Image (tube, grey):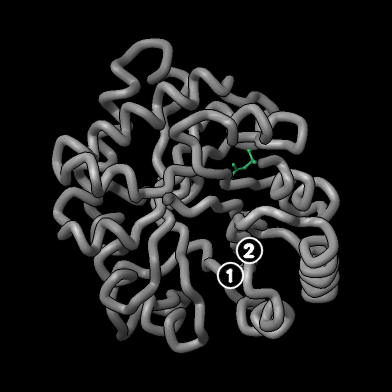
Amino acid sequence: MRKKIVAGNWKMNKVLDEAVALTSELVNMAKDEVQNDAKIILCPPAIYLTTIKKYIEDAPNFSLAAQNCSDKVSGAFTGEISAQMLQSIGVEYVLIGHSERRQYFNESNAVLAEKVNTALANGVSPIFCCGESLQQRQNEDYVGFVKNQLTESLFHLSEEQLLSVVIAYEPIWAIGTGLTASALQAQEMHAALREHIASKYGADVAQEISILYGGSVTAASAAELFASPDIDGGLVGGASLKSREFTNIVKAW
Ligand code: PEP
């Protein structure tokens, strides 16, 4: 059985008090209302990880993810945060390859492969983000483009390593735009990615990998998306900043 996951990417939002208040609300709402076995992963700005960890200690369905880590192990890389540092404060997951990192920080598939390696070497599970732009969807083999992102950043991994990776398909044209891929569009890509994984690692491994959908997910769109056979949850940006909306997304199964 694949893990059901809803991850909330707070991006560069919230000051400390707001981050703590949001976490407390989420933990209380989940305790009172969430009946399913979904894992809830909060991705706050790195500076709050240690604090937020204390607020989710008694909530076993909650985990933490960093939004990024360095591709380097350690050393003179001012401002960077290593996977080993994340591991040392008990962070279980890290977003790798979010489209904003690819776009604004020029992160290539090769650099992302290094980030995946250092995360796994330190026992931190990558949530590997992939997805095509609108231009690619309209003019190119967009499924082939996304498959290639997996090939170049993940397909050097052993079977055991790959089983620690979560994939998040996030069409760039749907991130922060209010445009959601339809459940059919998302399912088409998720099935293609699962088949691509099966072609390299076999069907049993492919069936074990959770593939999340991301791109303007709301409580209104989540149920139909999550009901699709190859969609195992969501990576949520804007709607993860509101406790009521995010909790309703978690309750969408
Ligand atoms: C994201 O940043 O990963 C994301 C999906 O954002 P939004 O939900 O706001 O589109």
Counting from the top left corner in percent of width and height, residue 250 is at: 70, 49
> Is 46 left, or right, of 240 in this rendering?
left
Viewer-closest of 60 and 95: 60
> Is 108 left, or right, of 51 in this rendering?
left
Most extreme residue toward the top, as rendered? Answer: 139
- Image quarter for ligand 1: top right
Disc 2, SS = strand
Counting from the top left corner in percent of width and height, residue 167 is at: 40, 47
Residue type at mark 2? Leu
Categorize mark 2 by other alpha carbons within 10 Å: few (<14), some (14-19), many (20+). many
Most extreme residue toward the bottom, as rendered? Answer: 88
Counting from the top left corner in percent of width and height, residue 177 is at: 66, 30
Viewer-closest of 170 and 60: 60
The residue tagged 1 is 63
Do the residues under discs 1 and 2 have CB atoms within 8 angstroms? yes
Counting from the top left corner in percent of width and height, residue 58 is at: 70, 81
Q: Quadrant of residue 125?
A: bottom left
Residue at image coords 35%, 57% = 165
Picture mark count: 2
Q: Indicate which label's residue lies in the foreground, 1 or 2.
A: 1
Asked if 56 appears above or below 161 in the picture, the reply is below
Residue at image coords 58%, 31% = 227
The residue tagged 2 is 42
Residue at image coords 40%, 53% = 166
Disc 1, SS = strand
Badge 1 or badge 2: first in the primary sequence: 2
Residue type at mark 1? Ser
> Is 122 left, or right, of 211 in this rendering?
left
Q: Quadrant of the C terminus?
A: top right
